[in-house]
Image (cartoon, rainbow, N blue to C red):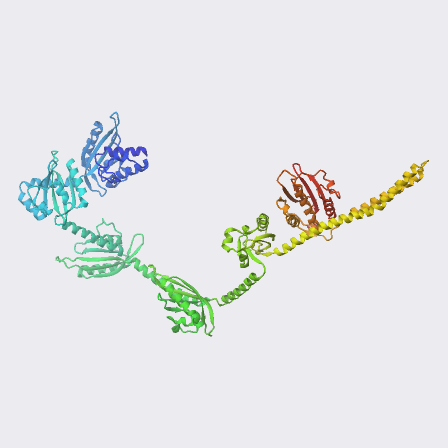
Amino acid sequence: MAILNWRYQTWLLKSPIFIVPLWADCSGCTIGTMEAAEPSSVDDQTLRLRQILDSSPALIHTGTPDGSLDFFNRTWCKFVGKPVEELYGWEWISCVHPDDIGVLLEKWRESIATGNPLETEARVRRADGEFCWMLHQKIAQRDADGTIIQWHGTSLNIEARKQAEDSLRKSVDELQTNKYLLAEAQRLGQLGSWSFDPAKGFDHWSPELFQIHGLEPTPEAPTSEVYLALVHPEDREFMASTMDQMLREAFGFDVTKRIVRPDGQLRYVRCVGSAASKTGSLKRIGVGVDVTEHELLTRELRRREAYLAEAQRLSHTGSFGWRPGSGEHVWSDETYRIFEYDPATTVTLDMIVERVHPEDRNLVLELIERASTSGGAIDCEYRLLFPDDRVKYVRVLTRPLRTVSDDLEFAGAVIDITEAIRAINEAKRAEEKIRLSERELRTLVEAIPAYVGTALPDGTVDFLSQSWLDYSGQTREEAMGWGWAGAIHPDDVDRQMANWRTALAAGEPLEQEGRFRNVDGIYRWFLNRNIPLRDEDGSVIKWYGILFDINALKETESALQTREHQLIGIIETIPSMLWSLWPSGEPNHLSQRLLEYLGVSSEELAHRGWPSLIHPDDRGELTKVFGHAIETGESFSAIHRLRRADGEYRWHHAMAEPLRGPQGKIIEWYGLSIDIDGRKRAEDHLRDTRIKLGRASRIATVAELSASIAHELNQPLMAVLGNAQAAKRWLAATPPDLSETNSSIERILRDIRLADETMQRIRALFKSEPYEKNDENVLDILRESLRFVHEDPKKRKVRIEWSIEGSLPPICVDRIQTQQVFINLISNAIEATDGSANTAKILLRAFVTQEHEVIVQVIDNGTGLEDTEKIFDAFMTTKEKGMGIGLAVSRSIVEAHGGRLWAENNPDHGATLNVALPASSKT
């Protein structure tokens, strides 16, 4: 692309003619300045340079050093009517006139050999076959060493100049002898002469030339400035350029321009000029001809001819002239097109008859014979048959012309009516189809379970189906126009008619409901739809309407609305707050009671999100439980605190169940929230009371236990003491009585066994069996246990995490006793972290073993255990105020359920309490 760009730039700089860039918007712009300010890419510059060459009026070409031409611009190719491939090398010589080829090639070879520029004239065949005189110029481009690397050339059309030169040459010869006649001829022909000397400007204007320009004749010719001032502003630049070129080059020209006389009159002047002689003088002579009338008539004639040709083309009507005596036929282009003959063909009567269909040929020959002998007019239709068996229908009209000559002459028109005939046939078939369709449509209209009608653009009804007349009991005459409106219910008539008139005015479709009276006087609900039919301009030309009986639908709708109002009343009056969710968990409906409780609108709640209204301590756990329900489709149940409109948090129990479709897919969630704050506070009070009573009971139990132990152990201990003292006395006797001593020792052993049995009975007080076992969900028990633990303010801040591995089966246990076990274990774990340096953290882990046991681990990061077995002994405690019976009782409860309870120290920090309970046998 860069090489091509360089070639174009080089040609522009070396070209024998001056080219102004297409994009230049100021005078004097050159290629050099263009390159200096070049803002665009190389590709853009190349495209612009190519546009310059292709849009140039000159025939531009380039050649290799050996004279073979390798580039032609588009003007060259268009002028000779050949593609560029047929011009490369020396093929372009085929376009040169045979008489001029020898001289042109001789001079061209001489320039190739010497490197001198070439300038010669030769005729070149134009695309239409005519030869035109061209001025051929070629210049060599050399490299730094002076070697020719390329030839650049142009070919300028000088045909007009040659003709003008011939004409002026003859005029100059005759001028010497016919000066008077020439002056008179100039006056009569409105033709003036002039001469132009480059050194002085115009040095001669004939009187007639002054008259043509609206000036008084003077001895001195006007200056170039005065002359250009008379030229029309739109032609002034062109004429100034022509005059400038005339000063520099010896060429002929023939141009027509407009001038404006001093009185404002516009005239057309044809200016023809050439060199005064062949001696190389730059003096020019020429003529100016006032061609205003001719130009105006020519333009009018061309305009009318164009109108006529376009009218014939659009109407498929051709014109012709016919002289029977000479056999001469004159056809318009459209006539040639209708008969499908080449316009260059000379038409004969045999050619015309040959195109006539054989079945119509005798008729046409008879009409031609009659017209050529009697001079009568012709008006007939017949068919044309073409070689490919196509048929055209034509209508021929001829009238004789009244001429001075006695020879008959006709003028006529031929009209291609093929499409019209086809349209008529199609119209007949379409009309038959329409009749059939109309019958079918009427049958369909009467058969459909609806009433149909049409109206004019102003709303006047012009058709109603028979079914409507049967329904309303109206006659067709009564219902036409606006009579149909009499069947509208009085309460609906104003509304319906207002809507109908609005639709008519706007031209927009209308859909409305209303009641219409039937033949029995009963009003039924109908859905009325009306749509407009428009033409190509968008204007309404017809209205089509239909009435659907929706009475049953309206009754059902009314019943549903009543039922809906009842349900809404129930929902809004029950002492709970109801809501529904989409399967994704997004709110679908919130009861008014819930919105009033929260003090927010549905839009505000959707923007903020419901978690923002949950107590911060409950938000995380509630979100997890809710997400689990949405993900698994399981029932949702949670107790949490919800903020009321006044900012107070109250305890609520939220529950939700999914509504599933036939395939089991969740369609919607329905839920309610019950305010249990009063119950929760009562439970808290009861729990506090129970804790206090439990503490008092434990104290009383300990006191009672102490008294019982003292009472139970006192007698055997006293007996042991007495027997021991007796044995001491028997041993102190002289001699010692060993027999009595042995008896005392036997009694001591008996009393000790009695004390041991007493202690066994006391230990049995700590063991209890479950009262009633049921299948329970381990996670539910753990959640409830955590809730009880968190009710202690001192234990709420400890972080408790979950790790549930897989799906857990139910266990058969006493819920209360099992719950007490987990409360005890979790509380101990929390208390074990009090002395730890780590941030307190508890982990609840649950999983199922291969032995079908449910394992629940309570893992803490506290200080750990000194002895993992002794902690389960009764009255064994590590707490400052502990009694040491909690873990013992817990193990008794677990073992009573057929399970196991044991402790382990963790590898890093803290301990793990393990509870293993058998899964329910029903799973």
Where residue 243 appears, as percent x and y from the top left, is 15, 39
Q: Is residue 526 left or right of residue 661?
A: left
Q: Is residue 767 visible?
A: no
> Which residue lies most toward the top here?
145
The quarter of the displayed image where residue 223 is located = top left
Of the 4 image quadrants, the one containing the N terminus is top left
Q: Is residue 635 above or below residue 28?
A: below
Numbered marks: total: 0
Where residue 719 appears, as percent x and y from the top left, is 87, 44
Q: Is residue 129 left or right of residue 263?
A: right
Q: Is residue 733 above or below residue 647?
A: above
Where residue 907 appears, as percent x and y from the top left, is 66, 36
Residue that appears at 23% across and 42% down: 127
**Depth check, front residue: 195 or 596:** 596
Q: Is residue 200 above or below residue 669?
A: above
**Depth check, front residue: 443 or 853:** 853
Q: Is residue 676 left or right of residue 96?
A: right
> Which residue lies most toward the bottom here?
520
Q: Is residue 471 left or right of residue 31?
A: right
Q: Is residue 153 above or below residue 527?
A: above
**Depth check, front residue: 856 or 561:** 856
**Depth check, front residue: 124 or 900:** 900
Q: Is residue 606 visible?
A: yes
Where residue 715 appears, as percent x and y from the top left, is 85, 46
> Which residue lies most toward the right here?
735
